[in-house]
Structures are given as C-alpha cells and as structure tokens.
Amino acid sequence: MEKELREELRALLTYPYQWSPSSDSTVEEYVSKYKPSMIQDDGTKPWLWVNNIHKPDFDAEKEAAAEEEATKALEETAKRVEEIQNDDAIPLRSNKKKGTRSKKELRDEATSQASSRLKEIALKYNHTTGKWLIYAKPDLIDAIWSKLAVSVASGPLSSTPVFSAKVSTSPKNDAGPNYQHVICVYLPNIYDESAAREVLRILVREHSTPSAAKPDLYTGIGLDSKHRSGVRSTVWQPKELIDEKELKEMRDAFFASLKAGTDTAGGTSKGPLKPKATDKKDDPFGSDSEDEDEGDKKAAKEKEVQRRQALLKSKAPPAGSSKTAPKKQEEFSTTEEEDEAPKKVAPKRKAKAAPRVTKRAKTKAVSDEDDD
C-alpha cells in the first residue's frame, strides 16, 4: 500500500502537464503551451494542473480510513431508502390527522441524516478537501482556463484558500456536440462556508459560475447524482451562498466581458469570442435576441394578414349590388375574414306598399354618418 502511494506521488511530481511555482516556465508560458482544447487524452494526460505555494499536507492513511467508514454509512443509507420504497405500509402521501408520513418524507430524512454523517466523518479524519466544479464548452475552455490558472498562481485566487486547479483535456475520439470540459478549483476545507463563498465570488465575477461544490470524500466513495442512495452529491450550490440577485449581476457582467473579448485568456484575447451555435438553453451567451427575432416574424405575419384583409375589402362589390364574388381561400384566413365574407341570400318575401330599405343600405347609411 505504502509503495503504491509513493509511486503514485512520484508519477504526479514528474507529470509534465502541470505547473507549480518551482516550474522552469512562467504560468503564462505554461497555459500558452498546454491548452485543454488542443491536448488529447490518450489515457496518460487526462488533466492539466496548476498549483500554488500553500498546498496542504495529505494523510493517505486517514483518507483511506475516512472513505472506508463513509462507504459503509452510504451503503446503510441506500438499504434504508430501498426499504422505505418497498414498504407498502408507508403511504405515498402524508396524513397529519393519522400521523402518517409519506415515502418521500422518510427518504428525505434518511438522506439528510446521511449527509450530516458524511460531514462528521470528513471532519473526524480531516478529509475535508473539495472543489468547485465549472463546466465549459470546447470553444470557451481555453480562455476560461488560462485566465483561471493565472489567477490561482498569482492573481485574485492566489490570496484565497485555493491551493490547486485542474481542467480536463480533450477526448481522443469525438465526444459529440454536447461535450463539456470540467474545471476543478480545490479548497482545503470545502465545508468552510466563508471560504467557499469568498472563492465563489471571485469565480463568478472573474472566471465562470460553478455548478456546485463537491467534497473529495464523495468522489472517493463514488457518490454522484445517480447513486442509488439518493444522497445529495454536493455540499454547496452558488445560490445557497450568494443572493440570487447579486449572483445574476456578477454572472451577466462576466459574460458581457467574454462576449466583448475584454481581458479574456489572461489578456491574450484579440477580439470578441464567437461561440458555436448551440441550443438556447445550453448557450452561455443566450439572450432575448432570439425571442425578439421570433416577435419580429410574428409581427410581420400579422401585418401580412391585415394587408390581405384590406385587399379583400377593397375588392368587395358595392352596396346593393346583386353580384357576389365567390370567396377565395386565403392562406392567412381568420375569423374576421370569415365574418366579412358575403352571406347567403335570404328567400324573397312579399313586397310591401312602402319601399323597403335594405339592411345593407341601413348599414351603409350609418357608416356614412360615422365617417362625417
């Protein structure tokens, strides 16, 4: 066990795709040479790393003990959740009068207790390291990563508890249009709320909004969003640490600067970024412009309908005329057009002594008075 750990540490220290303050090159030279969009992972280079000087000490034995105990606790929770789900005596809905609780309430209670238990284990063994997770599309990853790496080494993040960051390289084979790189920004104690908030503010304002923060303990025991226990796989989400209004303002300012090509990639951007076309829900630069385009199209269509209606009116026969033109089927027919179409002629009635004023003539006379 100890031999394996030494070999793993040696491999990490000689790993060519990482930068530290003791490296021969500057961090700017490093990020310029090694770009996540250009480095393909052949199984030996899945990550690009940047470290700073205050890297914490790790105790491999304590971490292994923590993961063993946490795995046991997680398995017990998974069994408890399964028992709740399969117990027909537990109703789907709670009943306050009868004092019964629903399956969901009992599951939520079990998973909440498990999260608290995992935190206790992490603190007990000092296995508290964790990371903010950032996802970015291939056309943006180089700009985001290079600026963030410089920030960790000598910028705003270097004065925070952040001790390291890494970014995934590109897959060897085509991963499809929805592929995203992941960036991990590491803190020594991910449960420290004030430290997590401090780092989050810098990330949102300067780099990109993380999706969530996840402890390394969770990664070690295989706890993800699809785990059968249903235990939450993260400890923080941005909206839990920063007011949503402030979060939105910082996020909008960041994307505006990226869109304009302002100070991106550590000041190396030569112009506005041009992200690839994506679905609006996936587009980090999505705006209301698409809705505006749709509105323009709708307005143009309505205008065309009004033009056709006016055209129909201008071609209608004069009042009192016995000829009625057959209605032409219009592409943009509406209820109003149908109402204005000629009606069927009623059967003739016996003539009276006084001359009869037709309904059409009355309507025309009223219309003439209104026009005056």
Image (cartoon, grey):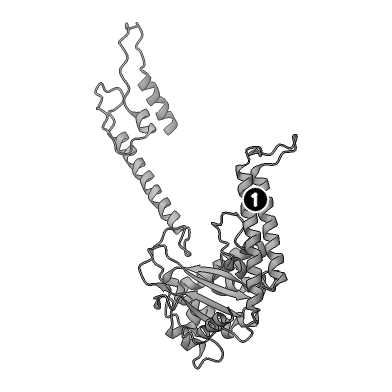
Identify whether 320 is placed above or below 60: above
The relative height of residue 86 versus residue 356 in the rendered view (above or below) is: below
Q: Residues within 10 Å of mark 1 (few under 14, many from 20)?
A: some
Q: Does 336 appear above or below 127?
A: above
Q: Position of residue 338 (x, y in %)?
A: 35, 29
Residue 70 appearing in the image: yes
List the residue tagged with mark 1.
80
Q: Position of residue 195 (x, y in %)?
A: 68, 73
Front-lying residue, 288 or 54: 54
Comparing 68 with 57, the one in front is 68
Residue 224 appears in which quarter of the rendering? bottom right
- SS of the residue at dot 1? helix
Q: Residue at x 42, y 80 (%)?
A: 270
User: Is 159 in front, or is 174?
Assistant: 174
- Residue at image x 65%, y 64%? 70
Amino acid of disc 1: Arg
Quadrant containing the C terminus is top left
Expressed as whole percent of the image width and height from the top left, the position of residue 337 reads 35, 32
Give the image quarter of residue 314. top left
